Structures are given as C-alpha cells and as structure tokens.
Amino acid sequence: MNESIKNTTGNPAPLGLLGFGTTTVLLNLHNAGFYELNSMILAMGICYGGVAQVIAGTMEWRKGNTFATTAFISYGLFWFSLVVLIVLPKIGWASAADSTAMAAYLAMWGLFTAVMFIGTLRLNRALQVVFGTLTILFFLLAIGDFTAASPGFKHFTGYEGIFCGFSAIYAGLAQVLNELFGKVVLPLGPVAR
C-alpha cells in the first residue's frame, strides 16, 4: 500500500536567499569602494554565503526541488571557491589568479547564472530580479577584470551588486513574513504558468 507522507519540513529558500544576499551586499560594498577586502567578507563568504547555502540546497534536495538545490549548492560553493582564490596565495599554496583568469572564472559563473535565469521565467518576479541582476553582476565583474576597468566602472559594478544582494534579501524575507502572517505582506510577483 502506497501511503504518502506529508512533508512538514520548513522552507529552506529564505535561508539560502539571505545567505546569498547578505554576503553579496557586503562584498559589493567593498567593490563600491566603502572599505577594503577584509576578514569580515571572507568569514561571511565561508559561513553564511557558503555553509548556509549548501545547507539550504541540501534541504531543497530533500523536498525534490532541483532548481533550488542546484542554485543554492552551486552559489554556496561559489563563495567557498572565491574565499579559497583569495586565501591560497596569501598562505603560499598557489600563485594568485591574474585578471584574465578571474575574468574567465566570473564569466563562467555569469553563463551559469544566465541559464538559471531562464529557469526563473517559470518562477516569481522576485527571483527573476535576483537572477537577472546576478547575471549582469557576474558579466560586469568579468569585464572589469578583463579590461582592467577604471575604479569608476568597478564602483558602478559594486552598486549593481548591492542592488542584486538586497533583491535576494527581499525575496528571502518576503517568504518568511508571508508564511508567518499567512498572507502576502511583501509581494514576490506573479508566478509564471
């Protein structure tokens, strides 16, 4: 006899969105010129951007959500890899990636994100904004590294990244508040059919 068991686990998407969004805002405040790259950004990249998103992705896997599993685990590992790219040269384990290598790294993440953005066309408007602005961010960062762009271009890119991060924070907090209140407190936009 096939009896279905109701899944009563919580929604892991807000954890993943908030881990991604908060870390993205903090890194892009650096890119916009507000402060130097520092241990706070690296710690957030490991803990909230990295670990929290991998946990959220694993929980989404349990719920059978392939898109969210792929997104959260991939971007969690992006944060781990970014921290490793920064730390390995500092501890003498590898030479630093030059600007061409970083441009290739960021462009590949941009390509991945562009394809994931296509997937959001079946989801709500808030996620379309997150993935759309993230696609733009990765390509702007890649262009900045590839062309040795001016500080003004890099600061502009940082502001775009701040917007991207806050859009993810909004999407995560909207899900939390909407679930808690049992109604739309913060709209996520229409879901595509």
Image (cartoon, rainbow, N blue to C red):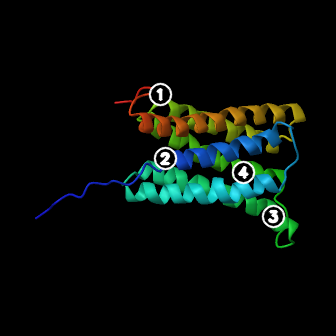
- Mark 4, other Cα within 10 Å: few <14 / some 14–19 / many ≥20: some
Which image quarter: residue 78? bottom right
Q: Which residue is mark 1?
A: 185
> Where does residue 44 sit, x and y in percent of width and height?
71, 54
Which type of secondary structure does the marked residue at label 3 adopt?
Answer: helix
Q: Tell me the CA gap for discs 2 and 1.
A: 17 Å
Of pointers 2 and 1, the one earlier in the residue sequence: 2
Q: Which residue is mark 2?
A: 13
- Mark 3, other Cα within 10 Å: few <14 / some 14–19 / many ≥20: some
Task: Check disc 4 and give the amino acid type.
Answer: Ala
> Where does residue 186 sit, x and y in percent of width and height?
50, 28
- Mark 1, other Cα within 10 Å: few <14 / some 14–19 / many ≥20: some
Residue furthest to the bottom in view is: 93
Which type of secondary structure does the marked residue at label 1 adopt?
Answer: loop
Give yes or no for contact between labels 1 and 4 (Cβ–Cβ under 8 Å).
no
Task: Check disc 2 and give the amino acid type.
Answer: Ala
Instruction: For residue 142, say whether it is visible.
Output: no
Q: Which residue is mark 4?
A: 104
Of pointers 1 and 3, the one earlier in the residue sequence: 3
Which residue is at a point 64% across and 50% down the rendered structure image? 108
Q: Which residue is mark 3?
A: 87
